Amino acid sequence: MLTLQKKQQVTFANDYVRKHDPLILFDSVASNATRLSLIKNFTSFNSDITGQTLPQWAFITPNMTDDGHDTNVTFAAAWLRNWLTPLLNNTYFMNGTLLLLTFDEDETYTEHNNIFSILIGGPNVINSSLHGTTDNTFYNHYSTISSVSVNWGLPSLGRWDCEANVFAVVANKTGYTNANVDITNLYFNQSYPGPLSDNLYVPEWPVPNTKATCASGQGVLAFVKSTWGNLTATYNYTNVYPYDAPDGINSGGTPTTGGSVSGAPAAGGGSSTSSSAAAATSSKSAASSNSVSGVLAAVIALVAALI
C-alpha cells in the first residue's frame, strides 16, 4: 500500500489521513514489522519499479491534495496524468497488470452511489477490442477482492467479498458467470451497524460466513475460520451486494445469489471451481504463471476521494 506524502499547498492540513490506509488499522499489521514494512510511500514505489520488485497486489491512495478532496477534479487529474503516463509506457509495469482507477463514494446521497471507475491493462490483460468500451455489469468495491480470489484461486474473507461479481477480464478467462443485479431501488449510501458506526453503534463486529464456498471455490480463509468458528453469519454473505434487511439498509432490491464457474452449482453458499490454488509468491515478476486464469500477474488499485 502506498501513500503520497506531500503537504496541502495552502493550509498544510489533511496531508495524510490515517483511515485512508486501511491496513494500518489492523493490529496484525501494525504489530508485525514485516507486514508494516510493506506500507510504503511513492519514493519506495519508484524503487520497486526500478528494481522490478512490485508486489502482486497493491493499494495506492494519494493524499488529500492529490486525490481531489482538498482541491478539485482538475488538480487531481493533472496529478494522475503526471504520475500514471510514464507507468503506462513501462513494459515491466504493464506486463500482466490490471490497474483499477476508482473513487470512494458519491457525496450526493439522494442519488444512486454509482462510482466512475476505469480498468487499464496491457495487451495480455485487456484485448484492444475492449478499449474505450463500457462494462455495465454490477460491481462494487468488494469485486476487487473477489476478482483477486478467483484469479489466483485464493480463499474468501467470508463477508461481502464472498460472492461479489468478478471483473469480466477475469470472469471471461475462468468461466465465472456474474449475476445480474437490478439496482433500481438500491442506493448503497448508508453505513452498517457496528463498532465504528455513530448512529447504529453495536459493540460486536459482524460474524463472517465461515462455511461458504464463495466465488473462487476455495472457501474461507483458515484464519477467519479459526477466529469465528461455527458462529452464525450476521448477514447473507452469499448475496452479490451488501444489504441489511432488519435495519432497512439496501433492502429495496431482490436478494441475488452470487454467480458461478461454468458447470458448477452456485447453491449452498457459492460457486466452485476445479482450478487449484495458485502457488504462493509475492513478486509480480513471478506471478504471471501462477494465476489460475493466466490473465493477471498483478492488481494495482488506485483509490481517490474527490468528495
Image (spheres, grey):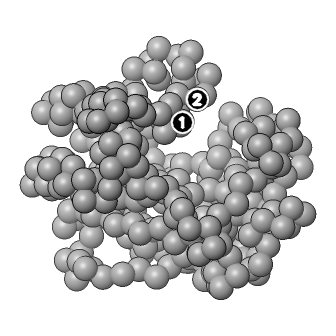
Residue to which mark 1 is pinned? 19
Give above or below for 95 relative to 27: below
Percent of width and height locating residue 93 = 19, 48
Tell me: 23 left or right of 5: right
Q: Are marks 1 and 2 in contact (CB under 8 Å)?
A: yes
Q: Earlier in the sequence, mark 1 or mark 2?
A: 1
Name the side, left or right, on which 131 lies relative to 264. Answer: left
Circle 1 — which element? helix
**Amino acid bearing label 2:** Leu
Residue 51 vs residue 135, the one in the foreground: 135
Residue toward you, 71 or 154: 71
Say above or below: 255 vs 208.
below
Please identify, in this view, whether the residue under mark 1 or under mark 2 is nearer the observer. 1
Asked whether residue 30 is in view, the answer is yes
Hey, what amino acid is under mark 1? Answer: Lys
Percent of width and height locating residue 220: 68, 47
How crowded is the residue under tag 2: few (<14 C-alpha within 10 Å), some, or many (20+)? Answer: few
The image quadrant of residue 292 is bottom left
Residue at 81% over, 57% down:
235
Please, is residue 138 above or below residue 227 in the view? below
- Between 280 and 298, the one lying in front of the other is 298
> In the rendering, at what x and y percent does residue 133 appear?
30, 82
Q: Residue at x 59, y 75 (%)?
A: 111
Residue 120 screen position, x and y as percent: 27, 64
From the image, tell me which residue sits under label 2.
25
